Amino acid sequence: MTRLACFYVPMFALAARLRSEPDLLHEAVGIVEGNGNNAHIVAATRRARQKGIHPGLSLTQARSLLPKLIARGRDAECERTAQEALLEVAESFSPRVEDAGEGVVFLDVMGMERHFVDAMSDVGRTLQSDISSSRTRESDLRTPEHLLARAAIRACEAVSLPARVGIAASKLAARVAAELPKSPNVIAPGEERTFLAPLPLTRLSPELEAAAMLQRFGLSSIGDLARLPESEIASRLGEIGRELHWAARGIDPRPLMPRAMPPEFREGMELEWPLVALEPFLFIANAALDRLAKRMEIQGFACKRLEFTLTLDPDGYDARGIDLPAPTRDVKTMLTLMRLDLEKTPPGAPVVGFSFVAHPDKPRRAQLSLFGPTAMSPEKLATTIAKLVALLGDGRVGMPMTVDGHLPERFAISDFDPPPPPDVRRKPSRAHGLLAVRTFRPPIAIEVTTRETADKETQIASIRTIANSLPPSTPHSTKRIEVGATIEIAGTVRICSGPWRVEEGWWSDRPDVREYWDVELERGGVYRLFRGVSEDWFVDARYEM
Amino acid sequence: MVESALRPLPDPPPIPPGEHDAIRNLRASLEASIASKLTSGSELIRALARQRREEILPTTIEPLDALLGGGLSRGKMTEIAGRGTRFSIVIAALAAATSIGEAAALIDAGDCFDPQLAEAAGVDLQRLLWARPRTMKQMVTAAEMLGATGFQLVIVDMATRRPPGRRVPDAAWVRLARVAESHGATILVSAPYALTGTTSEAMILAYAAHARWLGRGNAPRVLAGIETRLKLEKHRRMRPGQSVSVFFRCEEAIRGGRESGVGSRIQNPNTSSPSASQLQGRDPLKAFSDSRLPTCDTRKAS
């Protein structure tokens, strides 16, 4: 026995638009399809409908009825993202989900109701209070499937989609049940025919003209059709008639066709007017990112990479991508990164639409300990690192790493992913009492004066910084970070120690051979100097004084 | 694995009576001996958080810890200013925090941190976040963000001079102190001059240091280490004015010039300058291990 659920969003074009522009929810809004004289209403809000606006009216007619009608064109991007959101909600209830398009989703809920058996007692109490206040029908308390359907409605509302839910043994019955105004509707197994019988024939297949022909035969309800012999209907209407007869009897041979899980999440919108300033765009982008984050949360994902494409006026696109240092769902972080990227390189033309694509990844998880050092929330840590990268730049935040080799300026920086703290607090290990040096990156070029001692030994007599010079053979650094450009290191050397030779890459064509010296200046300060292969001198560290 | 599973957990901290009516009623209905052991999860977490805040993070530099009454106060901001060996203290504090499994952050405004040396000093690099800001504003903002994220130790280190950019307003330090207090983070500010004003719990002044060399006269020398004097300039719970001397050893001196944390320093055979062993006439490692240089020399200065 199969149990299928159908999620149905009535007036999907309108619902998708209102999801992107929730401020219009209580306004008189009409969704228009077509251009110029062909523009006609396809859906309208309750407030507009109360004023006589209904689907099929031309825009001119609608305006004559309601001059203040807010008209919005059908937005394919909005509808596509709304459909994806609906599918993602369905996937949080079942792994087998079929995309039927236009706000309709089928899912296999066979056995899924067992998740709600335990909740029956808890939720039942809530529903009892609802019944007493006449908000819920008593039938809602009957089975776990009702609880499942109600949970699905709440989940759809969380992504701003007013869905209706029907559960039955076939796709057709589930869809008809979902289309009924009062939701949810759960059709017990084997009762499909009884459920469908009193309904009008148009419910079966509104798009088929065969329904109109059957009405001419004097058949008004689905039950009337089901009572007729199948062969008689087939001889008059052909294969369509046979299918209709099966449908009327609650038989739907079409199987569920599950869709593959998409590798990414999309949100987007076509704007009514071109945007030329950043702030209005970020205002709209904030709402879209918020929807994106909610969808990822439903699936238990976080965003690892955010790609966004801006549609420019009059034509053209601007596509960008932001790699997040760690998976996150924090909208503020993503918006900050987007702002920084757009401020750095503006699109150069007004924006008339956008599309965001989030590449999902599993968020970091950690088990917190009561007795050990407090562990950081992985989500919070990821967000902070993303913000720090935005603030300080790439390669300036992370976990320091040592690199194999003898040259002291070598280092690497990688993603900060600390191991979990120990379960029980430990005592700190005793300090090594080591003297730290402050490294200059890159080394500072200097002039050195040498002298010979009585023992014919070479000693350093004085040093002086070479103004505005960078070392020609700076091995592993690209720019000066230290305020070293203005560092003045000069003076007579009081004591020097060296040379200490460091050799690296002796097997290569250009080995790096250096002679290191420690010098103390008479005016104070102990420095580490080296002379490279090119006989140039550099200061690469200062022993702190 | 079995051993770790059977390892006894420490006793929970003393838990003050709960305020929730349900817990109070439940306790009242039980025997006194049982009721005294009853606690709710939220009470336990609050008590553990309070206990953590009352703790002190030792730097494991004994003279400095003695000066600060045990170490760096959690939930407070401590400042070290002056021309002394501030960076060595910073590295020691990082080593202490990471060795007990805590996450630490170093905001290195001078970009002068050497991971190889830090690892040799005992810093667990896997638990260290290294941020390299370019301006004062970035430096303070990063500290505030990291403190609020849950890092147990956040160190802000300025090199010998101020990073470019405008001065940060005093309110920034007030905010930073509040972040430390609200999140139980230990914040250590190391700068060449006093920055935090009245917002810090304690302030240590590091006086200009003196280098100590091995070898005398015209003989070649080896840098043994640097000695500095630290003075307690201000403390909210202790009497200021005390000072101690701290000696930090040079790694090359410890290892006798044979091997260092930054690579092997090989004596140049082409030069006539003798090695450390020749200098002392014996094995360099033994020479320096016997040189009676204390790791941390505590001497009360007047």
Image (cartoon, coloured by chain):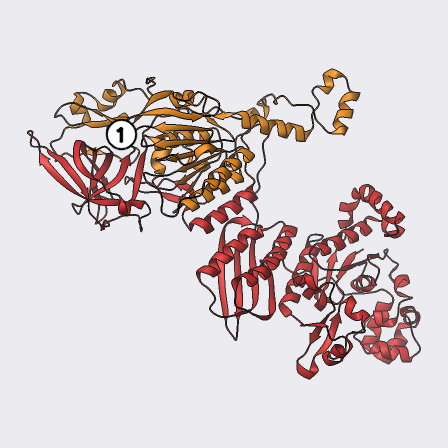
Chain colours: A red, B orange
Using the image, determine if residue A213 lies above or below residue B17: below
Of the pair A412 and A51, the residue shown nearer to us: A51
Counting from the top left corner in percent of width and height, residue A148 is at: 78, 51
Task: Pick the residue in front: B48 or A98.
Answer: B48
Residue A256 found in image quarter: bottom right
Task: Give the percent coordinates (x, y) of residue B206.
Answer: 34, 28
- How far across and down, in percent of the image, does residue B58 sit? 45, 25
Give coordinates of residue A255: x percent, y percent. 74, 63
A17 relative to A113 in the view: left or right: left
Where on the picture, by quarter, is residue A503?
top left
Q: Is residue A292 left or right of residue A392?
A: right
Quarter of the picture holding the N terminus of chain B? top right
Label 1 marks a residue whose chain is B
On screen, A276 above or below B15? below
* Quadrant into which the C terminus of chain B falls: top left
- In the picture shown, does residue A391 fall above or below A71? above
Query: Is residue B120 shown to the viewer in this render?
Result: no
Q: Amino acid at mark 1?
A: Glu
Q: Give SS at disc 1.
A: helix
Residue that extends furthest to the bottom in the rendered view of this protein: A37
- Label 1: which residue? B252
Quarter residue B99 falls in? top left
Vertical order, A134 against B289 (above or below): below
Q: Is residue A536 left or right of residue A193?
A: left
